[in-house]
Image: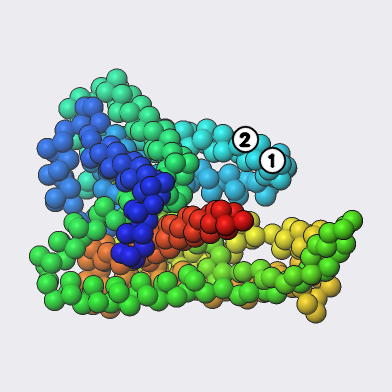
């Protein structure tokens, strides 16, 4: 990895992309620690130090420690990620969106525009919810300090507007990284959010038990290695293209393969399941947990070590894995594309038979992939439930979501750096060949 970075920084173009990405990350982190106007920073810090709620730690993890600080970038990238997932889900049910998805670059630009509009709407809802909790004094259950200097509607409107504007700036930063930097912009920002809270988690564990920290780091290394192995695992379906003659040129006659990953859905099912479980927790916290519904949520869904929570979390991850895989990979569309270019899977008829074969293989791969995502996400919960210390599960930095984000984004970024280096090597080889001729 270090050798790859040294090689990358020796290339002027690639060095510029890396430095630009780092600059955008620094700007993103600055916005996450910059408090919004009207926020009592001292009270927020004091309440954060007292808090031991699992919901608080979960929100801190997904926002990089920014949401509960009521900063300018408090909402992070989650509104944009959620909007993108919702638009992808709607594309299978709304004919207009499905037609736009098939129109190429212009259709994708229109879908991106719709995603931005939905992101702003979700940001308004999320910001209003967080500020309402802060105003009512329910964002931190064990702290009675006033988090806002002024409780007037004008101040609340200013804070909500600031957070929504911060979300729009985050969208812009992500697109800038994608266009002028290295890797996918939003993925890089998600990676930054998760890694940003690592030092505080590790320091907290070190204060409690240094031996536990060493054990956790060692187990984390093996867990990361296992995740890398499974994330790289794929089923390669051979595809043969027939030879055809057009004029004086011969096309086809080659063989390739169609890669199907074991974890075809990536991190999306875990994010969806976690976000869906946070909603009833925040609703119960906003209403004070009163009533039969609030008491049921407080009893079964707030404590992460409860069997109902574990089963619900696992079932949601499995369901979302199958759902998202079916949306992102359409066997009928892939089979039509293979047949259109004169290709076929050896031993399988083109067309419907190929689509049925791909659907069968995909279902066989999705089952272990969904089980892997569910088991990986439940590792910290089950571990601390066995140790009879469920309150410490939020201090476990090698949870399934954290490891998946780090490994997934890290692998994709390294692949893009290697692709840039290989492309430059090919250009240099072609230039030397042309100079010799």
Q: Identify whether 78 is placed above or below 353.
A: above
Cβ atoms at labels 2 and 1 below 8 Å apart: yes
Going from N to C along the chain, the mark reached first, 2 or 1, is: 1
Residue at image x 29%, y 73%?
220
Q: Which of the colour schemes (rainbow, by chain, secondary structure, one colour) is used?
A: rainbow
Q: Residue furthest top?
A: 154
The residue tagged 2 is: 110
What residue is at 31 percent from the left and 24 percent from the top? Answer: 158
Name which quarter of the figure residue 202 lies in: bottom left
As drawn, is 223 to the left or to the right of 351?
left
Q: Quadrant of the N terminus?
A: bottom left
| Dot 1: element | helix
Q: Callout 2: helix, strand or loop?
A: helix
Q: Position of residue 150 (x, y in %)?
A: 20, 24
Q: Position of residue 80 (x, y in %)?
A: 46, 42
Question: Which labelled disc corresponds to residue 100?
Answer: 1
* Real-space CA distance between mark 2 and mark 1, rounded to the nearest whole angstrom: 7 Å
| In-image side of 320 versus 347 (left or right) | left
Q: Which is more toward the observer, 157 or 72?
A: 72
Could you say where residue 305 lies in the image, as x and y percent from the top left?
32, 68
Residue with the most extreme front position: 437
């Amino acid at each position: 990895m270090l050798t790859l970075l040294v090689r990358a920084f020796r290339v002027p173009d690639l060095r510029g992309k890396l430095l630009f990405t780092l600059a955008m990350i620094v700007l993103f982190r600055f916005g996450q620690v910059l408090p919004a106007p009207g926020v009592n920073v001292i009270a927020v810090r004091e309440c954060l130090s007292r808090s031991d709620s699992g919901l608080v730690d979960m929100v801190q993890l997904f926002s990089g420690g920014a949401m509960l600080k009521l900063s300018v970038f408090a909402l992070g990238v989650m509104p944009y990620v959620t909007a993108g997932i919702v638009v992808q889900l709607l594309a299978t049910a709304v004919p207009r969106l499905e037609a736009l998805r098939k129109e190429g670059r212009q259709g994708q630009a229109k879908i991106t525009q719709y995603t931005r509009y939905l992101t702003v709407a979700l940001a308004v809802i999320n910001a209003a919810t967080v500020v309402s909790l802060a105003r009512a004094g329910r964002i931190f259950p064990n702290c009675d300090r006033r988090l806002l200097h002024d409780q007037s509607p004008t101040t609340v409107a200013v804070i909500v507007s600031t957070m929504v504007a911060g979300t729009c700036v985050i969208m812009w930063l992500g697109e800038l990284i994608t266009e002028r930097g290295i890797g996918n912009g939003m993925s890089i920002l998600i990676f930054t959010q998760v890694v940003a809270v690592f030092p505080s988690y590790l320091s907290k564990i070190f204060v409690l038990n240094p031996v536990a920290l060493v054990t956790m780091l060692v187990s984390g290394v093996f867990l990361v290695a296992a995740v890398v192995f499974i994330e790289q695992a794929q089923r390669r379906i051979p595809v043969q293209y027939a030879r055809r003659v057009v004029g004086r040129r011969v096309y086809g006659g080659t063989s390739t393969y169609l890669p199907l990953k074991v974890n075809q859905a990536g991190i999306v099912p875990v994010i969806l399941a976690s976000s869906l479980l946070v909603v009833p927790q925040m609703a119960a916290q906003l209403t004070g947990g009163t009533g039969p519904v609030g008491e049921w949520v407080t009893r079964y869904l707030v404590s992460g070590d409860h069997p109902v929570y574990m089963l619900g979390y696992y079932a949601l991850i499995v369901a979302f894995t199958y759902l998202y895989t079916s949306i992102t990979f359409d066997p009928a569309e892939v089979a039509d594309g293979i047949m259109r270019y004169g290709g076929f899977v050896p031993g399988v008829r083109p067309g419907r038979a190929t689509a049925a074969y791909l659907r069968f293989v995909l279902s066989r791969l999705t089952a272990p992939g969904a089980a892997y995502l569910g088991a990986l996400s439940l590792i910290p919960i089950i571990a601390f439930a066995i140790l009879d210390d469920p309150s410490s599960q939020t201090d476990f930095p090698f949870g399934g979501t954290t490891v998946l984000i780090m490994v997934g984004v890290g692998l994709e970024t390294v692949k893009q750096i290697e692709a840039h280096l290989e492309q430059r090597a090919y250009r240099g080889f072609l230039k030397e060949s042309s100079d010799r001729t």
